[in-house]
Image: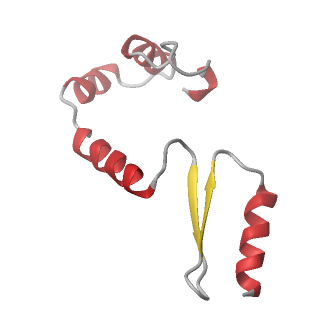
Amino acid sequence: MYDNYSGENNGWASQEKIFEFAKQMELDMEKFIECNVNEKYIQKINASNRDARTLGITGTPAFYIISINNQQVEFISGAQPYESFEKIINLMLEN
């Protein structure tokens, strides 16, 4: 689905587009539609959104790296290269 991403607030993930993507991926459309109409996972989605707001997360991906040595917490927002994670983890291991 994200291969079709074309920016925010332009309808790329509208209900119509999501159904179009599901068809392209050859999903079981009957199950897919039933899941969407019945909002099968709405409680999990809402809980996840509440958790994100509580943690100050405003987008995806988002990562919290927590040191096992001293419980230091580092937050990484957005898609980052391996080196960003490596640097933080190595610093935490040193402390």
Instruction: Say if 78 sits above or below 22 in the image.
Output: below
Comparing 29 with 72, the one in front is 72
Q: Is residue 8 left or right of residue 46?
A: right
Given residues 19 and 53, the one toward you in this image is: 53
Figure label count: 0
Horizontal arrangement in the rendering, residue 27 relative to residue 3 (left or right): left
In the drawing, does residue 38 fall left or right of residue 15? left
Residue that sits furthest to the left in the current view: 38
Q: Describe residue 11's horizontal placement relative to residue 41 as left or right.
A: right
Task: Residue 33: give x, y in percent of width and height.
Answer: 28, 21
**Where is residue 2, by image quadrant?**
top right
- The way the protein has been coloured in the rendering is secondary structure
x and y, in percent, of residue 48 in the image: 35, 49
Is 12 located above or below residue 40 in the figure? Answer: above
Q: Is residue 69 above or below residue 64?
A: below
Up-down: is 41 above or below 82?
A: above
Quarter holding the N terminus is top right
Q: Position of residue 12 (x, y in %)?
A: 51, 16
Q: Quadrant of residue 30?
A: top left
Residue 85 percent coordinates (x, y): 73, 63
Residue drawn at x 73%, y 69% is 88
Identify the residue shown where x is 77% and y is 86%.
94
Image point 77% across, 67% down: which residue?
86
The residue positioned 77% from the left and 59% from the top of the image is 84
User: Which quadrant, please, contains the C terminus?
Assistant: bottom right
Quarter of image, res 20: top left
